[in-house]
Image (cartoon, rainbow, N blue to C red):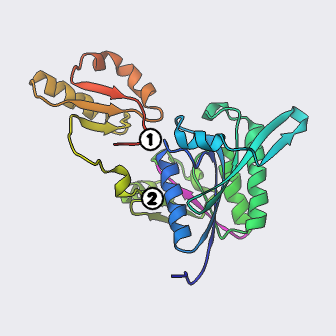
Amino acid sequence: GIPLLTMKFLFYSPHALTDSSSGAARSVSALLAELVALGHDAFAVTGTIADQDNQLLARLLALPAADVLEVPEVAIKRDLRKVRINGVEHCVVCFDSNKVLSLLAVEEALLAQVFRQVFDEFQPHVVLTFGGFSSNYLAGFYARDNGSQAVLYAATHNYVDASHFNHVDKVVTPSVALRRLLDTVSTKPKLALSSLVRREDVLCRTREPEFITFINPTLSKGLMLILTLARECQKQHRPYRFLVVESRGTRATLQPFAGQLSELNNLMIGSNTADVR
């Protein structure tokens, strides 16, 4: 039915909301779609920074430009693309590179300018953001200064200082465990959401397990446990095989352990994939 109060949600981040290789992007995209299905309005102002190249982002970049943004002082021009996905209007500034470290300050300033324009026209009740870019903080402060609630979607434990939450009123996490961990860092109110992942998107059609699979292990997320398990199983001639699926940053984490990994004939490393099946 129609909600008692129709609310407006505005998402902002230089990180592409259409990055299907990012768990945070997929979760927030699903959240916005669910809010629209409940009768609320949602808009997204986003860039093209991505964890990995993927088909969804490539299809967006192939669309014709709706406008061209210019900064004449530095001879910068960037395409602006507009698309509606799952009922959510997307305004996307296309950066010259999709890598985090290649983002130009002038590109981020262009995106922030688009955010302010959309904010002033859309007049959202809530601004939702994720990521640690400078303009994420500016968007949160702008929202609060103009009477809106600013909410951070915190998908990792990397928010290790209370100052990381200065720009928001509330925090949303994907799990109770993460909420409890972040409670030790900041006193800002937090809400742990139930899973935003649809079961039909992740369940295999048939089940023929070949490996014990680990997704994106790092030093803080089980890497040493995997190495120990694989080493002990190999020593004891157990028939188990292990698969490590990389995600953002994992390759760099695994490099120092290249020698140990090469000694384990029961462990394989697979590249990142948007489809976990």
Among all residues in the image, which is located at the extreme right?
73
Q: Quadrant of residue 268?
A: top left
Asked which secondary structure carries label 2, the reply is helix
Q: Give me the C-alpha separation between circle 2 and circle 1.
A: 31 Å
Place of residue 210 in the rendered image (x, y in percent of width and height, measured from the top left): 21, 34
Does residue 3 appear in the picture of this structure? yes
Question: Residue flagged by tag 2: what amino acid is it?
Answer: Asp
- In the displayed structure, 261 sits above or below 185; it is above
Residue located 40% across and 56% down the image? 197
Residue located 22% across and 45% down the image? 207
Q: Position of 167 compared to 211: left or right?
A: right
Residue 104, disc: none
Q: Callout 2: few (<14), some (14-19), or many (20+) C-alpha neighbours within 10 Å? A: some
* Bounds of the magenta segment: 147-155
Question: Residue flagged by tag 1: what amino acid is it?
Answer: Ala
Residue located 34% across and 57% down the image? 199
Mark 2 or mark 1: which is in front? 1
Residue to which mark 2 is pinned: 183
Query: Which of the two residues, 171 or 35, is positioned nearer the viewer here?
Result: 35
Asked if the residue at tag 1 contacts the one at tag 2, i.e. Cβ–Cβ closer than 8 Å, the answer is no
Does residue 188 appear in the picture of this structure? no
Q: Callout 1: few (<14), some (14-19), or many (20+) C-alpha neighbours within 10 Å? A: some
Q: Position of 184 compared to 101: left or right?
A: left
User: Which is nearer the N-term, disc 2 or disc 1?
Assistant: 2
Place of residue 195 in the rendered image (x, y in percent of width and height, measured from the top left): 39, 59
Residue to which mark 1 is pinned: 274
Q: Position of 220 compared to 132: left or right?
A: left
Place of residue 22 in the rendered image (x, y in percent of width and height, measured from the top left): 49, 44
